[in-house]
Amino acid sequence: MSYTRDEIRSAMLLYAITDQRWLKPGQSLLEVCRDVLEHGATFLQIREKDLDPGDFEREAEAMRRLCKAHRVPFVVNDSVEIALACGADGVHVGQSDIRGRDIRALIGPERILGISAGTVEEAVAAEKAGADYIGVGAVFATGTKADADYIGLDAFRAIRESVSIPVVAIGGITAENLRELAGSGADGVAVVSAIFAAPDPGAAAAELLALTKETLGRG
């Protein structure tokens, strides 16, 4: 399923990124993702650094089917090969992945391309590389990604103003600090532990969606 730029912007609202490390005994990642999608997530990225390629592809294929049923965009973190193999809607990559590689050419014009950025220069480079959206952060301090540099809200606003494509805020976002993004120009928020580490991920997704709509004026 292909998405227009406006549809992608709308889908940025509550962008969930998986992390199986938070699964409780007896839970499956697919089961939790189903709950999260049913209660509010509008976009889903599978990001599982600890899975071997075979298991990663199997999980990605199952999530692709789940997201298709919910009409929610689904992208694979980093692996263009697995994104193509499982029929994902797209791929999300980092800055190192676009140096010397034309990711847009590899995935074609119809699939979604997301690229991470932490500076104005990186954001501009991502847009030139054909990104459909940019994940910008870390806007708050985060323990989810050890190598994530905290950039703060002023830098986020500068990045937002430097590009014309959708921008989603990521990094340390919780129900407690989400309102600080008011007036930032963010098209949505991307969260990991705020959903997957919650006692009830579905309820957390519902709360975050309501807060995001209120904060970003997207009710």
Image (spheres, rainbow, N blue to C red):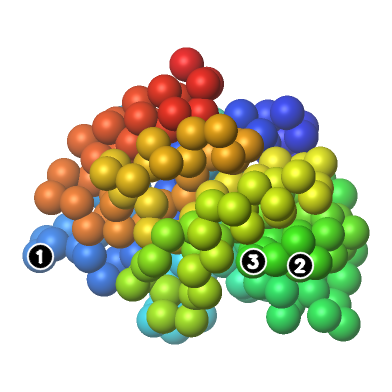
Residue 154 is left or right of residue 33, and the answer is: right
First along the sequence among labels 1 and 2? 1
Q: Quadrant of residue 146?
A: bottom left
Is disc 3 in contact with disc 2, using a CB cutoff of under 8 Å? yes
Q: Residue 67: x, y in percent?
A: 49, 41
Q: What mark, if any, has residue 122 been given in the picture?
A: 2
Q: Nearer the viewer, residue 148 or 158?
A: 158
Q: Which residue is mark 1?
A: 25
Q: Which residue is mark 3?
A: 118
Three-letter residue code for mark 3: Gly
Q: Residue 15: x, y in percent?
A: 48, 45
Q: Given the current orientation, which residue lies at the most extreme left position?
A: 25
Taking the spot 76% from the left edge, 67% from the top edge, the residue there is 122
Three-letter residue code for mark 2: Glu
**161 over 13 or under it: above or below:** below
Residue 66 visible in image = no
